[in-house]
């Protein structure tokens, strides 16, 4: 198992464009999370999936953000009409739950210009 | 809902010890600890369950006081490789929040 994979690693986009990120979790992990992290801050919770069901979404998340996890495998995070404030590292993490911690991907660094 | 960590930053010489604290305004049922090196993703260190304490690897251990809604991470005889930002994390399965972070720098 190669761990949690995220693609792309870096994304530069113009303000107003839409972007989509992909996360491939560890195959046996049924729980998947998306976080956003800005410089010097801890990861900020965005949304949570258990299998294909999106069970929680942060109230801080605007309606420009949407996430899916079809078939309970990989997940995508889409940001529509990007703004400069969206510039951040977007991290995906998966876990099997219980006493297991979260395994993070390397993240996608988004820069909105 | 975000746990608060203290100190915000600490600088140690190799071989010195450090303690990082994590406090929550909500009841804690479990606490995770992670270390993040610059430009990398957070890496899981250990989990502490309610009423328990679990030792991690190397000379890093942690305690959990659910009455005080606090957890502490202990780094003993620090090594250069311990440098990074440490985060505690807590929550339910649906929502999991990371702390404010503690930057640890170990110098020779």
Image (cartoon, rainbow, N blue to C red):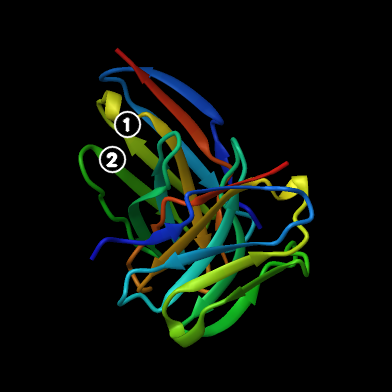
Q: Position of residue B49 (x, y in %)?
A: 38, 64
Chain of the residue under label 1 = B
B43, above or below B49, in the image: above
The answer to whether residue B70 shows anywhere in this view is: yes
| Side of A2 relative to A78 (left or right) | left
* Location of the N terminus of chain B (image quadrant): bottom right
Of residues A86 and B83, the one drawn nearer to the viewer in this rendering: A86
Q: Position of residue B83 (x, y in %)?
A: 37, 29
The residue located at (39%, 42%) in the rendering is B73
The residue located at (33%, 26%) in the rendering is B17
C-alpha distance separating marks 1 and 2:
9 Å
Res. A65 image quadrant: bottom right
Around disc 1, counting alpha carbons within 10 Å, would you say few (fewer than 14), some (14 to 19), or many (20 or more)?
A: some
B67, above or below B79, in the image: below
Residue holding disc 1: B82
Around disc 2, counting alpha carbons within 10 Å, would you say few (fewer than 14), some (14 to 19), or many (20 or more)?
A: some
* Location of the C terminus of chain B (image quadrant): top left
Dot 2 lies on which element? Answer: strand
| Side of B76 relative to A32 (left or right) | left
B99, above or below A23, in the image: above
Residue holding disc 2: B60
Chain of the residue under label 2 = B
Mark 1 vs 2: CB contact within 8 A: yes
Q: Position of residue A70 (x, y in %)?
A: 50, 84
Q: Position of residue A32 (x, y in %)?
A: 47, 71
The residue located at (33%, 68%) in the rendering is A99
Dot 1 lies on which element? Answer: helix
């Amino acid at each position: 198992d190669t761990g949690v994979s995220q693609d792309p690693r870096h994304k530069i986009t113009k303000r107003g464009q839409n972007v989509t990120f992909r996360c491939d979790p560890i195959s046996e992990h049924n729980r998947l999370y998306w976080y956003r992290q800005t410089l010097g801050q801890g990861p900020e919770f965005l949304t949570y999936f258990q299998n294909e069901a999106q069970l929680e979404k942060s109230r801080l998340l605007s309606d420009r953000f949407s996430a899916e996890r079809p078939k309970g495998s990989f997940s995508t995070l889409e940001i529509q009409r990007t703004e400069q404030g969206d510039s951040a590292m977007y991290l995906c993490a998966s876990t099997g739950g219980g006493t297991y911690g979260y395994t993070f991907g390397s993240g996608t660094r988004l820069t909105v210009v | 809902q975000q746990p608060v960590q203290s100190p915000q930053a600490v600088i140690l010489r190799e071989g010195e010890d450090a303690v990082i604290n994590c406090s929550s305004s909500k009841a804690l049922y479990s606490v995770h600890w992670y270390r993040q090196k610059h430009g990398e993703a957070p890496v899981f260190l250990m989990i502490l369950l309610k009423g328990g304490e679990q030792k991690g690897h190397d000379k890093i251990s942690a305690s959990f006081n659910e009455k005080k809604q606090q957890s502490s991470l202990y780094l003993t005889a620090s090594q250069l490789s311990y440098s990074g930002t440490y985060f505690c994390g807590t929550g339910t399965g649906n929502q999991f929040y990371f702390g404010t972070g503690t930057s640890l720098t170990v110098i020779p």
